[in-house]
Image (spheres, rainbow, N blue to C red):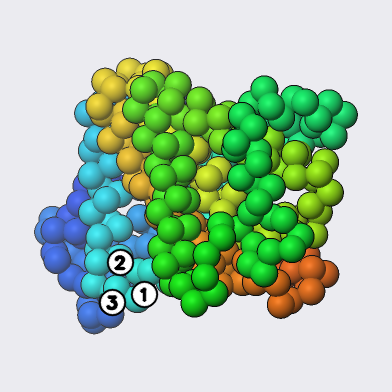
Amino acid sequence: MRQELFEERYSERWRAFEAALATGRKPGKRGTLSAMPLTPMPVEEFPSRYREICHHLALSRDRQYSTALVERLEHLALAGHQWLYGARAFGGSVREFLFHGFPALVRRRIRYIAASSLLFFGPLIACLIVIQLFPDFAQIVLDSNQLNEAQQMYAPGNTRLGLQRSADNDFVMFGFYVANNVRIDFQCFAGGILFGVGAVFFMLFNGLVIGTVAGHLTHMGYIETFWGFVAGHSAFELTGVVLSGAAGLMVGMALIAPGRRGRFAALRANMSDIIGLVYGASLFTFLAAFIEAFWSASRLPPVEVKYAVGIFLWIVTLSYLVLTGRARKGWKDAS
């Protein structure tokens, strides 16, 4: 559809939506949303009108209509979101994001998630397999000191797994794991500013290093100590890396292929989704560090229990991202 026909067909509805916003009424107040001389809009009709605006915005972006039209619809969508959710308590906004907005965002940006997963898990799995066939390959990626340090961390005789420390400083290690995971996530995300090249590099690099360590320790026979250690927090930690990489790829794509808009405008148009992925990655990273410090390092739970917990958390994580928030349509699903 040509832009002129598109605007002619829907401009009256957009003006009505603008007029409704101009009244300043909030959800829950009695009456209608109106601004003469346009027809009053019932309060209960506003959410469906808002979803329509988001749909029109998505169509305008996809069809590469003029920047002026896209920016007008972006303004309406943002104002509508503020009207719907701005008056809610902070806890309500957090619940909305966690149980609807974020998983819907992941599904909508599945191409970036898939690309990030391939860049990260591809070299990880490849190294894990190759080292079982050619053990010396590990020394091409990491030097002997690094490999020996990994062996010491997961030696079968250790009373605590992972970095060696005293048994009474789990909170200190929790802070360390948070900092370490955030560093990796930040590299994958911030690297996107280099037109995506940095994000691609850090995803490949971290996948290569992790895969090499996993492959080397598996070949050494440290199965229970290493895989028992990583099982519990792997779902959250690795998902956080993938989400950060996807956000970095979105930044890079906005700079490489902005379409008819300028690079800054394209980046701004995608910033809401980028920040949403970063928020989600931060949550997963925090959860992973907590489990890593207080559960993974302990030798008390049998390794079978650790494996079971790890599998359960992978199922929970994937189910959350795939299934949560599908019961109803919201501002992100519609856009």
Q: Nearer the viewer, residue 168 or 198?
A: 168
Residue 295 pos. (x, y %): 61, 71
Mark 3 element type: loop
Residue 176 pos. (x, y %): 43, 58
Is 22 on the left-hand or right-hand side of 116? left
Q: Amino acid at mark 3?
A: Ala
| Contact, mark 2 vs mark 1 (Cβ under 8 Å) | yes
| Residue placed under numbered mark 3 in the picture | 89
Q: Amino acid at mark 2?
A: Tyr
| Residue placed under numbered mark 2 in the picture | 85
Q: Is residue 288 above or below residue 14?
A: below
Residue displayed at 43% across by 25% down = 198
- The answer for how far apart the CA atoms under marks 3 and 1 are is 5 Å
Q: Nearer the viewer, residue 197 or 13?
A: 197
Looking at the image, the residue that sits furthest to the right is: 133
Q: Amino acid at mark 1?
A: Gly
Q: Which mark is residue 309?
A: none
Is 132 on the left-hand or right-hand side of 189? right
| Residue placed under numbered mark 1 in the picture | 92
Residue 153 pos. (x, y %): 63, 54
Quadrant in which residue 41 is drawn: bottom left
Q: Is residue 184 above or below residue 325?
A: above
